[in-house]
Image: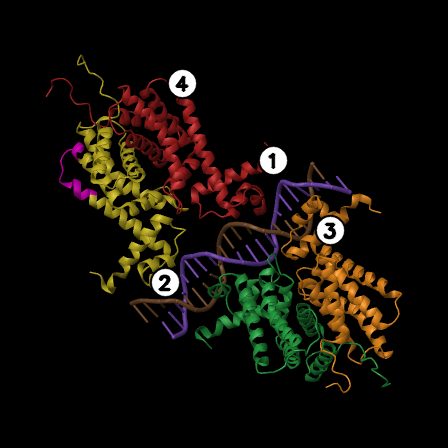
Chain colours: A yellow, B red, C orange, D green, E brown, F purple
Amino acid sequence: MTRDGGKRERILAAALEIFATQGFSNTTVQEIAERAGVGKGTFYTYFPTKEDVFTDLLNDGLIHMGQHIENKIQTLKGSVVKLRAILREQLRYFHDHQPLCRLIAREAWGHNDQPSALAQRIRTSYIKMLQEVIDKGIKEGELRTLDSETAATALYGMVSLVALYTKDLSSDEALRNVEMTLQELFFSGITQRQPIMGEA
Amino acid sequence: MTRDGGKRERILAAALEIFATQGFSNTTVQEIAERAGVGKGTFYTYFPTKEDVFTDLLNDGLIHMGQHIENKIQTLKGSVVKLRAILREQLRYFHDHQPLCRLIAREAWGHNDQPSALAQRIRTSYIKMLQEVIDKGIKEGELRTLDSETAATALYGMVSLVALYTKDLSSDEALRNVEMTLQELFFSGITQRQPIMGEA
Amino acid sequence: MTRDGGKRERILAAALEIFATQGFSNTTVQEIAERAGVGKGTFYTYFPTKEDVFTDLLNDGLIHMGQHIENKIQTLKGSVVKLRAILREQLRYFHDHQPLCRLIAREAWGHNDQPSALAQRIRTSYIKMLQEVIDKGIKEGELRTLDSETAATALYGMVSLVALYTKDLSSDEALRNVEMTLQELFFSGITQRQPIMGEA
Amino acid sequence: MTRDGGKRERILAAALEIFATQGFSNTTVQEIAERAGVGKGTFYTYFPTKEDVFTDLLNDGLIHMGQHIENKIQTLKGSVVKLRAILREQLRYFHDHQPLCRLIAREAWGHNDQPSALAQRIRTSYIKMLQEVIDKGIKEGELRTLDSETAATALYGMVSLVALYTKDLSSDEALRNVEMTLQELFFSGITQRQPIMGEA
DNA sequence: GATGAATGAGTTTTCATTCAT
DNA sequence: AATGAATGAAAACTCATTCAT
């Protein structure tokens, strides 16, 4: 599958790690080439410009994340079930692919003059998907009637910030705990269920 | 407004706008000076380095946002009431200070190798505050028992992403609609209230 | 004598000290003004450019040194007597006016593109004087017949390098010792007087 | 001569010439690169900073001059013979390597705030050597008893100033004449040998 | 195909000099 | 007359990109 000894992949992997840590501008092609174990010239055999690796990384990443999650929910039935799976998988995905996701996140805030270009794609390609699930749930009565775009964005924001801010998410247990909290929060809200009727 | 005809302020304002659009590295001192309507040298009369304007901007911004919101909730009683106010005010603040908040958000993901320095401060200075309110609410039975740190981060993530992603938030009505959605979502969850009582 | 409260003199003195320590290029007008206790703008009331203070300093210095030494020898009779006095006074002058002399010396090697300009003046204004004394001494038979220009330059080089290189020349005793050595050297040479006559 | 077509050497040579003429501060990297016939960036492929070429030049120069002269005198016997050779070789070396020596000389007066660093080395590495020869000569009775450090410095000062000040030293004859004068001066003094006994 | 030496456009920063107060 | 805020020209240095080997 990889002619050329996987050089392209090695470069992408190296770039990902360094971009994620240092950002686009503070990363030199030299560094990437070194970490990938190739000459600087070789970098340009595989990518026309530094910007291109970045874009490729982002595109591939977004596609991969989208597909990964769509795969997971494809066979599931019911909006709540689907959304629960999305929440879980997205959290896990962010956690398992921290560097990539950090890149996506930062890019989402616009790393340069055409911030929309890709941030746009996040909204359209990924958040749109969430939105559709939510819309369906509303129509079918499983979900409360609310603005689905806002809800989808909120879900995405919740999970991504938690995934990237929470210091210790390395143990499986910690991850599960955080997930449970988010599930509760997103599906039932933070408020203590009011003692409906005379239950007290 | 002060001596020097507010040059310092003009530079800060110009820097804020450009940094927010283009990021730190893609912004040149030249651009800032031009937009501020001063000479390049003048920039250096007021700030030792380019990095310093950036830091000043961020520090002041974080302090300002924190104080603004703390002021708003200080006199309120009850965790739910407080959290509702926080949600509303934060949304509004992000909306009213888009450039600044975009800066804060992006910085949170680390604009360079020492991302923690300021990201840390957001967590400690701002999210900690949310966490305390939630903790109190849990203790007093107003809120469901859940991991308060995760909940606080989730609230912050929800609001900030929605504020920055939502294209049209300019009309007061749009803003109110989005707010309402988030309030419902955060406090009551997305799920349609289960047919309470013995309807099954 | 000094209208304006001696500001000009204060600037010259300040400039001399800093130029001597840091060189022309590494000295800023700001520094000079500060050390002189005046505003930066005031500097330009008294001197058209930074270069001008430097030149003035050098010119005045050369003139002053020349006059000082000429005064000392004017009344003396005999070339050897005169040269001995010159050697003594020059050594002392270098020692007493280290900063100025350091400036002159460095300039002599050319501090910029027109190195000759001033180096020339040293040769013409000062070394010429030595040369004349030597020439007279030769003609009158007091001095050995040799190339007077070379001898004059050598005398100047001897004294100036010793004055500026010798670490401890602060005590009067040390100064006298060094002078004695130079006198012996210049007038009688380093060689042990050959066993005159048939002593062997 | 080495790989890279001697670029490093070309840069060093160019730098030497320009530094010697214009001084360190008045020389731009651009100029050096141009004169060396390379791009500005290439300069930085070979030297980390402008300061580094300067230092390399000086270090190499001092070492070279020292070795050159030590080689010349190593096999000679007798202090007077050695000193005569030193005087001759130093004069010739200064003359043959004017730019380098101009650099060394100027540095001796301190080209910036840390003049000692290298000026020190001149004293220690080179003048010390002269001093040792003189000391030996004194001990063995060939030379007059005098302060050897002062004498060594004087010799150095004499020769270097004459070498750098004397306008026309290009013909071999001129050089020999100047040398003879200095030899006479340094070894026998300027004074006409007193009519010892009744010779007149 | 792989490489790294060569390059110059572009960026930050300094500082002599001007000029309004 | 004295000042220092304002300025932009100039200089060191970086790094994406090219290209000869």
Q: Nearer the viewer, mark 3 or mark 2?
A: 3
Residue annotated with mark 1: B5
Tell me the mark number nearer the camera, choosing from 4 and 3: 3
Residue shown at 41% from the left, 51% from the top: A26
Residue that appears at 80% across and 73% down = C131
Q: Are marks 3 and 1 in contact (CB under 8 Å)?
A: no
Foreground: A16 or C60? C60
The residue under label 3 is: C13
By secondary structure, the bulk of the magenta-drawn segment is best described as: helix
Q: Is residue B169 visible?
A: no
Above or below, B44 against A142 in this view is: below
The correct choice, above or below, for A24 with respect to D59 in the image is above
The residue carrying mark 2 is A40
Q: Position of residue B144 (x, y in %)?
A: 24, 23
Q: Quadrant of residue B106?
A: top left
Chain letter, disc 1 residue: B
Residues D117 and A176: in front is D117
Same chain shared by disc 4 and disc 3:
no
Q: Secondary structure at mark 1?
A: helix
- Give the amino acid type for the residue marked by disc 4 in the picture: Thr
Report the disc number at residue B75.
Answer: 4
